[in-house]
Image (cartoon, rainbow, N blue to C red):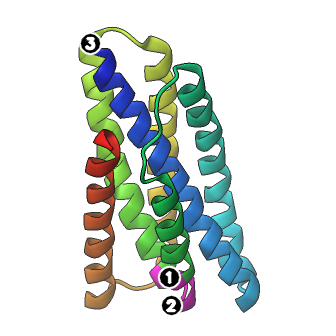
Amino acid sequence: MENKRLEEIIRVDHAGEHGATSIYKGTIDVLNILGDEKTKKIISEIAEGETAHVKEFDNLIRKRSIRPTAFLPFWKLTGYSLGAITALAGKDAIMACTEAVEEVIDKHYSDQIKEIEKSKIEKEFLFTLKKFHSDEVEHKTKAKDESGKNSVLLNSFKEIVKIGCKGAIKISEKI
């Protein structure tokens, strides 16, 4: 595996984990105002895992001297806004957003794992990525289990979120 490609992988994953923590921060901040303690507890548990991922990717970026995406401040702002807006729309919207984000990340990490396994290098990073992938699948499952309804509107919203996530991935790998 080329060093340039590994840098792209770490850069985009670093950006994605920061984006995820921003989504959950926006959600939790609004849930605090609304007083929805039950949903806040679920999202807070997911956010804890994402915070651990951020710490690891911050460390990798620093340790390997990899340039973070130039869009990181934008992803943080849009992530926070997405989380806050979905929280205002209620638990079903929160879970739809979480499920959509985690579904994209599930596939994204799966593809990266296959790519790194083929290269037969970066075993330590591969172990970390597999652990994080497992966490993301757990988050997706939790969101599916907690979602109350599956309306046309929520399904459309999920598709929009997925498109946004895929676009952010493409941009953050390169820029």
Asked if residue 155 lies left or right of residue 139, the reply is left
Q: How many marks?
A: 3
Q: Position of residue 148 (x, y in %)?
A: 46, 83
Badge 1 marks a residue whose secondary structure is helix
Residue 87 belongs to the span the image colors magenta: yes
Of the residues under marks 3 and 1, which one precedes in the sequence? 1
The magenta stretch is 85-93
Say which amino acid is labelled 2.
Ala
Label 1 and label 2: CA atoms lie apart by 5 Å
Say which amino acid is labelled 3.
Ser
Q: Residue furthest top?
A: 120
Badge 2 marks a residue whose secondary structure is helix
Q: Is residue 35 visible?
A: no
Q: Main secondary structure of the magenta part?
A: helix
Label 3 and label 2: CA atoms lie apart by 44 Å
* Closer to us: 79 or 162: 79
* In the image, residue 143 above or below residue 149: above
Q: Position of residue 63 (x, y in %)?
A: 59, 20
Say which amino acid is labelled 1.
Thr
* In the image, residue 152 above or below residue 135: below
Disc 1 vs disc 2: Cβ atoms closer than 8 Å?
A: yes
Residue at (47%, 83%) from the top-left corner?
92
Q: Quadrant of residue 60?
A: top right
Asked if residue 2 lies left or right of residue 20, the reply is left
| Numbered label attached to residue 119 | 3
Q: Residues within 10 Å of mark 1 (few under 14, many from 20)?
A: many
For label 1, the residue is 86
Asked if residue 35 lies left or right of residue 81, the reply is right
* Closer to us: 57 or 68: 68
Q: Residues within 10 Å of mark 2 (few under 14, many from 20)?
A: few
| Numbered label attached to residue 89 | 2
